[in-house]
Image (cartoon, helix red, strand yellow):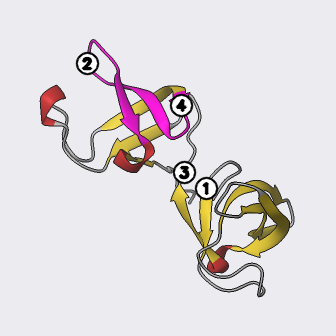
Amino acid sequence: MRPFDTVILTTDLSANLPAGTEGTIVDTYALADDVYIVELFDRDGSTLQVVDVRADQMTVTLADFAPGERIALLADVPAHKLVRGQVGIIQERVAVGVYRVEFAGKAASLTLHAGQIMLLHWQLETA
């Protein structure tokens, strides 16, 4: 989970903030890996509250990707001869949840929704 990811509460935080309330991660704490500052909204998009939420109290509904990040496709895109798992690089955010992605060996880039891709994490093993 990262700033600007859209989330939904999976547990009640209070009577005014029940499970199902939607929000956006605003920031993280340097010393607390599993606690996030989240702005929660009502159905009209008005801010209800900005609160600390643990990772186990919410789930990401729309991840925000940044230019330069490596992603993988979650499903085939036959029209462009791309297959599930194929790796690409985010070139730019076109709109909220929509990204222009470039794939290795392809002349053109493709515009994809966040729900079609996942962020790749890679870490060098140390002995």
How would you classify the magenta stretch by its main secondary structure? strand
Across and down, in percent, residue 29 comes to 84, 62
Tell me the tag on residue 6. 1
Q: Amino acid at mark 4?
A: Ala
- Placement of 108 over or under 65, stated as above or below: above
Q: CA distance from mark 4 to mark 3?
A: 13 Å
Question: Is tag 4's residue or tag 1's residue first in the polypeptide sequence?
Answer: 1
Question: Is tag 2's residue or tag 1's residue first in the polypeptide sequence?
Answer: 1
Identify which residue is drawn at 72% across, 61% down. Answer: 41
Identify which residue is drawn at 36% across, 44% down. Answer: 72
Question: Is tag 4's residue or tag 3's residue first in the polypeptide sequence?
Answer: 3
Q: Residues within 10 Å of mark 4 (few under 14, many from 20)?
A: few
Q: Residues within 10 Å of mark 3 (few under 14, many from 20)?
A: many
> Start and end of the magenta stretch?
94-113
Q: Secondary structure at mark 4?
A: strand
Q: Amino acid at mark 3?
A: Ala
Front-lying residue, 20 or 114: 20
- Residue positioned most to the front: 44
Q: Amino acid at mark 1?
A: Thr
Identify which residue is drawn at 34% across, 19% down. Answer: 109
Give the residue at mark 2: 106
Question: Is tag 2's residue or tag 3's residue first in the polypeptide sequence?
Answer: 3
Q: CA distance from mark 2 to mark 1?
A: 30 Å
Give the residue at mark 4: 95
- Placement of 79 over or under 109, stated as above or below: below
Q: Secondary structure at mark 2?
A: loop
